Image (cartoon, rainbow, N blue to C red):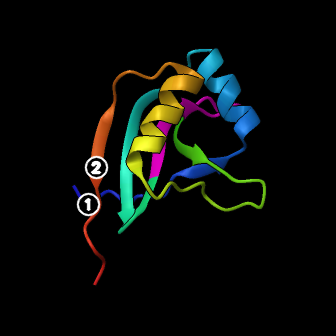
Amino acid sequence: MNKRFIPMPISLECVDTIFQEKKASSITIVRTTHNKWIFTFEAPSPTTGAIELCTLQTQRGSVREWSDPRYLFDWLFKRYGVQEGNFKILPKEK
């Protein structure tokens, strides 16, 4: 089970729509490196309908990261009402 971790970054507007339409599933908080946390979720592709792994993209086109997971948990709860999900710490790459 050596699944590659490459979520598709999408805009905040699209993430808001996905959560409002209750199409997000498998919400996971991920530590990608020391002091860098992101969240991922699965959602259907608007073009193919296939389930894709997604994450939040900044206005400048990079993946949105939090340095403290407590703020990320708080943001997900306040913005989308997320109350449960998964937690993952990725191993260091050699």
- Residue 44 visible here: yes
Q: Dot 1, crowdedness within 10 Å: few (<14), some or many (≥20)?
A: few
In this picture, residue 27 sits left or right of residue 54: left
Q: CA distance from mark 2 to mark 1?
A: 14 Å
- Quadrant of residue 1 in the image? bottom left
Vertical comparison of 92 with 19: above or below? below
Pointer 2 with pointer 1, Cβ within 8 A: no
Q: What range of the chain is rendered magenta?
A: 38-50
Residue toward you, 71 or 76: 71
Disc 2 element: strand
Looking at the rendered image, the quarter that the C terminus falls into is bottom left
Residue toward you, 54 or 36: 36
Question: What residue lies at 34% left-to-right and 30% top-to-bottom?
Answer: 85
Instruction: Report x, y in % for residue 12.
Output: 71, 39
Farthest residue, direction left: 1
The mark lying in front, picked from 2 and 1, is 2
Instruction: Report x, y in % for residue 68.
Output: 42, 53
Vertical comparison of 23 with 7: above or below? above
Task: Identify residue for label 1.
Answer: 2
Disc 1 element: loop
Residue 43 covered by magenta stretch? yes
Residue type, numbered disc 2 = Lys
Residue type, numbered disc 1 = Asn
Question: What residue lies at 66% left-to-right and 51% top-to-bottom?
Answer: 57
- Residue 47 visible here: no
Q: Dot 2, crowdedness within 10 Å: few (<14), some or many (≥20)?
A: few
Task: Identify residue for label 2.
Answer: 88
In this picture, residue 28 sits left or right of residue 92: right
Instruction: Report x, y in % for residue 47.
Output: 72, 34
Residue 61 covered by magenta stretch? no
